Amino acid sequence: MFNQKKDRIKPFQVDQQEINTIIGDGFEIKGEVSGVKAIRIEGSIIGNVRIETAVILGEKGLVEGDLIAGSAIIFGTVKGNVKASRLEIKKSGRVEGNIETEIVEIELGAKYNGKLQMKNEADTVLDIAS
C-alpha cells in the first residue's frame, strides 16, 4: 500500500568505528580539536571539534564550540552548532545550537534548541579540513 524503501537506514554502530582517542572525564582542552579517526569525549572541550569519521560525546562530555564530524552520537552537551552526515542525540543529550545533517535521530527526553537543516546526501559536503 505504501511505497517502502528497499534500502533501509541501518543503525549506527559505535563498535564499527575504531576509537583512536579518548578525552577522559576531568580533562579540559581549550582550543580546536581535529583529526581523522574516531574520538570519544568524556571531558570538556572549549573550542571547535572537527573529526572526519565519528565523535561520541559521553554523558559527562561537553563541547563549547561547533562540532563537525562524519557522524556523531551525543550523550552529553554541545553548546554550539553541529554538522554531521549522521547524528544521534540520546535521551541524556543536549544540543544548544543549529544542526545540519542528512540523518537525525533524537531520543525521547533529549533536549535540542536551535534550527534543523536536513540535507540530501548529494548536497552535503563536510568541510573538515578547514
Image (spheres, grey):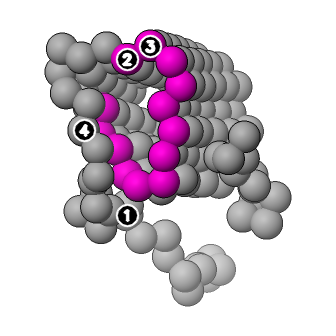
Q: Give the residue drawn at x 75%, y 55%.
A: 124
Dot label at residue 11: 1
Q: Which residue is mark 2?
A: 29
Dot label at residue 30: 3
Amino acid marked by disc 1: Pro
Looking at the rendered image, the disc whose residue lies closer to the viewer, 1 or 2, is: 2
Q: Position of residue 50 (x, y in %)?
A: 55, 39
Looking at the rendered image, the disc whose residue lies closer to the viewer, 3 or 1, is: 3
**In the image, 111: left or right of 92?**
right
Q: Which residue is mark 4?
A: 22
Q: CA distance from mark 3 to mark 1?
A: 32 Å
Please tell me which of labels 1 and 2 falls first in the chain: 1
Please tell me which of labels 3 and 1 falls first in the chain: 1
Secondary structure under tag 1 reads: loop
Q: Position of residue 81 (x, y in %)?
A: 62, 25
Furthest residue in direction right, as rendered: 123
Question: Which region is colored magenta?
Answer: 29-41
Q: Is residue 33 magenta?
A: yes
Instruction: State the quadrant of the C terminus.
Output: top right
